[in-house]
Image (spheres, rainbow, N blue to C red):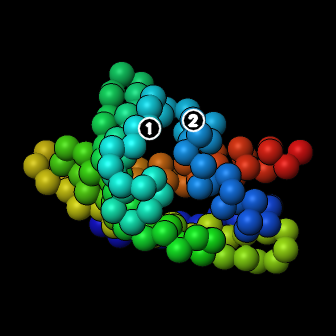
Amino acid sequence: MKYTVDITIDLPRSKVIELFDNPDNMHKWQPDLVSFEPMSGAPGQPGAKSKLQYKMGKREIEMIETVTKNELPSEMSGTYETKGVFNNISNRFEEINEKQTRWVSENEFQFSGFMKLMGIFMKGAFPKQTLKFMNQFKAFAEGQAN
C-alpha cells in the first residue's frame, strides 16, 4: 500500500529541520512515544538504527527505525519495522517561501501474516495516522515560534 500526504508549516525550512531533526523533540509531538533508543550507527545518518516504543491505548508497539537517507534540509528517509509491518517513508521538506515549508511524506507499507488483513480492512487509517503525526509536529513547531 502506497500513499502520499503533505502539510504546510508556517515556519522557514531551516527552523522546521532544526526541530524535526532533534530526537529530544519527538516526545513533544508524538505523545504516544514511550522511548527512543539509538541502537547502532551515528544517529540520523544512513544505516543508523533506533528502537522506538509506543503505547497507543492498551497496545504497546516496538519498532526498529533504520535511516536510509539523510539529505537534510531537503529529505530524510527511513524504514520502520514491527511485527507484520514494514514501512518505507520518504520525508521531503520544500521551501514555499521564506516563512513556509511544505512537508511531503511518501509511505509504502508491506504487511505479512495477520497484519495483511489489517492492511486491507484498515487501509484508510494509515494515511489518517500519518497526517495526525504531521499535524502534531506542525502544532509543536509553530508553537515554538510564538
Check the image and name the residue furthest to the top.
58
Q: Assess disc 2: are there few (<14), some (14-19) or many (≥20) residues with their C-alpha within 10 Å of its C-alpha.
A: few
> Residue 93's x, y, as percent?
62, 71
* Left or right: where 85 falls relative to 141: left
How far apart are labels 2 and 1 at the CA level? Answer: 9 Å
**Residue at the image position 39 percent from the left and 61 percent from the top:** 67
**Residue at the image position 40 percent from the left and 28 percent from the top:** 55
Determine whether the residue tagged by mark 2 lies in a helix, strand or loop: helix
Determine whether the residue tagged by mark 1 lies in a helix, strand or loop: strand
Q: Could you tell me which quadrant the N terminus lies in?
A: bottom left
Closer to us: mark 2 or mark 1? 1
Q: Amino acid at mark 2?
A: His
Q: Is residue 8 visible?
A: yes
Earlier along the polypeptide chain: callout 2 or callout 1?
Answer: 2
> Residue 110's x, y, as percent?
23, 61
Which residue is the site of mark 2? 27
Q: Amino acid at mark 1?
A: Phe
- Looking at this view, is 26 or 140 the one in front? 26
Q: Quadrant of residue 95?
A: bottom right
Asked if the residue at tag 1 contacts the one at tag 2, i.e. Cβ–Cβ closer than 8 Å, the answer is yes
Q: Assess disc 1: are there few (<14), some (14-19) or many (≥20) residues with their C-alpha within 10 Å of its C-alpha.
A: some
**Residue at the image position 32 percent from the left and 35 percent from the top:** 61
> Residue 106's x, y, as percent?
45, 70
Q: Could you tell me which quadrant the C terminus lies in?
A: top right
Q: Work out whether 89 lies above or below 113.
A: below
- Looking at this view, is 66 or 5 the one in front? 66
Residue 36 is labelled as 1
Q: Is residue 123 visible?
A: no
